[in-house]
Amino acid sequence: MRAPKMLSVLRIAILGAALGALVSCGGGPPPGFPPGGFKPQVTVVTLRAQTINLTREFAGRTAPFRVAEVRPQVNGIIRDRLFTEGGFVQAGQALYQIDDSLYRAQYESAQASLKKSQATLQAAKLAADRSRALVRVDAVSAQDNENAIAAESQAEADLAAAQAALNSSSVTLGYARIAAPISGHIGKSSVTQGALVTANQDASLATIQQLDPIYVEVNQSSNDWLSLKQEIDSGRVRSDGAGTPAKIQLENGTTYGYEGKLQFADVTVDPSTDNFLLRVIVPNPKGVLLPGMYVRALLSEGQLSQGLLAPQQGITRDPKGNASALVVDAHDAVQARTVQVSRAIGDQWLVDSGLSAGDRLIVEGVQKAQPGMTVQPVERGATDATAPGAAPPAASAAPGAH
């Protein structure tokens, strides 16, 4: 029984001797027990100020550039439908023909009245001319001359009235042929041949939509707008304003092939949502965008001069959402910083406060670093990973914010 106990004691002694030899040969202490002078290696990124294009992504819907609802302006029976449903129509193209028998008869009657008025005026003019010649030799009385001149003026007025009546009947006759007010794609017809329509009825006969270009309507919160305006007023951000370019992403995730421009921002905030409308105008020559489609618009809000971007892996948050970071000072000591970030730009955070240009932010090995500890910093991307003082690469701005 004593032999197994002696064997166990011998094994423990050998294991302890091996562990001691490992420590004495520079193998490093076990985790959690660093001796004095041990410096853990961490990867850092030196932050640099740069010009950043601020963008924001909005969800929205497409809307037609122009919409015209076709309605009759005279009463009558639809005799013909002159277009193909779902097709493209040109402004002025005939769409419907209303039975115009009554309106044509009225037009012809007005033409006859005009000719009668012209003849009456001709006779009155001749009579007035003769009267003017006779009154000079006292062949007619002054009263008769005045009556002849008045009859001529009356005939001229009757002719003008007849001409106006003819013009009015011509317009009414033209209304019997319903034409497209704008160019665009026309939808289905709500009436067929033989249907009775009335002037200015509530129901439209068809709807025409101009889809090239097309609108993308999105909403921005008033809170975001106030924050951006304060930055613009302070000079920190330079705004592009109207005409700002916008990239469109379709609902299947693909990027639309044409770039739009911000046309205008509404001046009224919806009290139920605290949002206001932004309208982007987008070319649509191939008809890819249809009214009512869900899209996302990436709009430029302006340029931030001397902005600071920090890699996201270097920023941590506590359960309350407060952001913090660890930086390495000039003496290679770790410092804790409370940080405020406003938005993500690619895989980086836009820093508002807490960090400055030139700070060396720890992005790898954070778990090995504690505030006050001296570490061995290595710049991320350095050609010599063992050289703490290697020159850092130039920072570049991410393409856009989300």
Image (cartoon, grey):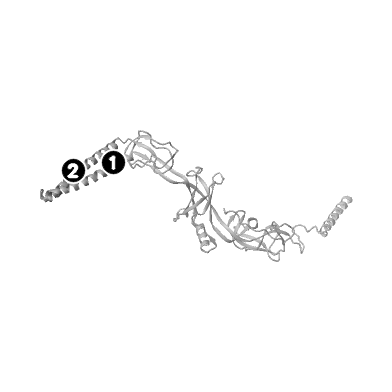
**Which SS class for mark 1?**
helix
Magenta stretch bounds: 166-170
Query: Which amino acid type is shown beneath numbered disc 2?
Result: Ala
User: Does residue 397 appear to the left or right of 78 in the view shown?
Assistant: right
For label 1, the residue is: 169
Q: Nearer the viewer, residue 227 or 115?
A: 115
Tags 2 and 1 in contact by the CB under 8 Å rule? no
Q: Nearer the viewer, residue 227 or 257?
A: 257
**Which SS class for mark 2?**
helix
Name the chief secondary structure element in magenta. helix
Name the residue at the top extreme: 194
Task: Classify 39 as above or below 77.
Answer: below
Q: How crowded is the residue under tag 2: few (<14 C-alpha within 10 Å), some, or many (20+)?
A: some
Q: Nearer the viewer, residue 212 or 330?
A: 212
On whether residue 142 falls in the magenta region, the answer is: no
User: Does residue 103 appear to the left or right of 223 in the view shown?
Assistant: left
x and y percentages locating residue 266 in the rendered image = 45, 54
Residue at the image point whose x is 52% and y is 61% from the top: 232
Name the residue at the right extreme: 3
x and y percentages locating residue 33 in the rendered image = 76, 60
For label 2, the residue is: 123
